């Protein structure tokens, strides 16, 4: 077949297998790629964090949960963010999986220099994607939603506000949510301890 034949098979069709992803990502600054200078202000957040929290909302009963957050980098000017939580019973035993999120935290750059402004893109398996804009002040980060996109089958979420901080070596956060016809209301708060990184 001729190279300009649009019906010819693509060159990758019969190519040999590909090796595993060849670039490191790390939540531990002692190993892996060098941290991009734009992330210096976010360095205290990099690691694996685990702890407990309390949740609630005007439309549901309060609940206790455990959570693990992994914040890592691959040498480029953004952080990978992954969170998974599980419901706990009165004896702190796991009951069932709860919320999950994946996404990215990105410092806003002025040329090659990071400003104190941040962008966060977060997505859940329940069909909600949120774009947050925020600001870093020391070891505190405040995010507010700029846009919420959801699938036709997702619950209605219209806005959010998140406050993160490193306090005495722990990661603390509080999250407010506007959803299912309710105004912005407290939803989640937790204290997580660094377990790796």
Image: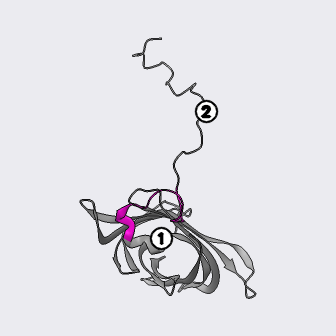
Q: Is residue 17 magenta?
A: no
Asked whether the residues under the numbered discs 2 and 1 touch, taking CB atoms below 8 Å apart as contact, a structural biologist would say: no
Given the current orientation, which residue lies at the most extreme top position? 1
Tell me how far mark 2 sits from mark 1, CA to CA: 43 Å
Residue range highlighted in magenta? 25-40
Q: Position of residue 80 (x, y in %)?
A: 48, 62
Most foreground residue, 52 or 1: 52
Residue 34, visible in the rendered structure? yes
Give the number of the disc on residue 17.
Answer: 2
Q: Residues within 10 Å of mark 1 (few under 14, many from 20)?
A: some
Residue at the image point whose x is 34% and y is 66% from the top: 107
Q: Is residue 26 magenta?
A: yes
Q: Position of residue 23 (x, y in %)?
A: 51, 49
Q: Position of residue 19 (x, y in %)?
A: 59, 39
Give the mark nearest the N terminus, 2 or 1: 2
Most foreground residue, 4 or 29: 29
Q: Residues within 10 Å of mark 2 (few under 14, many from 20)?
A: few
Residue at the image point whose x is 49% and y is 69% from the top: 46
Prevalent SS, magenta region: loop
Give the number of the disc on residue 156.
Answer: 1
SS at circle 2: loop
Q: Position of residue 194 (x, y in %)?
A: 57, 76
Residue at the image point whose x is 42% and y is 15% from the top: 3
Give the number of the disc on residue 108.
Answer: none
């Amino acid at each position: 077949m001729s190279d300009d034949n649009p019906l010819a098979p693509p060159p990758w069709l019969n190519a040999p297998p590909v090796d595993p992803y060849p670039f490191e990502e790390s939540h531990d600054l002692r190993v892996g790629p060098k941290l991009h200078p734009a992330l210096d202000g976010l360095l205290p957040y990099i690691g694996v964090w685990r702890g407990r929290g309390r949740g609630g909302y005007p439309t549901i009963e309060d609940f206790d949960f455990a959570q693990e957050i992994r914040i890592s980098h691959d040498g480029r000017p953004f952080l990978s963010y992954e969170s998974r939580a599980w419901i706990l019973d009165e004896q702190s035993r796991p009951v069932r999986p709860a919320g999950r999120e994946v996404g990215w935290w990105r410092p806003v750059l002025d040329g090659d220099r990071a400003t104190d402004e941040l962008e966060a893109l977060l997505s859940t398996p329940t069909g909600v994607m949120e774009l947050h804009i925020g600001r870093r002040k020391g070891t505190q980060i405040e995010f507010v939603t700029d846009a919420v996109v959801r699938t036709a089958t997702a619950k209605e979420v219209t806005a959010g506000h998140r406050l993160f901080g490193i306090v005495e070596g722990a990661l603390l956060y509080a999250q407010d949510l506007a959803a299912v016809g309710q105004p912005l209301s407290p939803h989640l708060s937790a204290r997580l301890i660094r377990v790796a990184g």
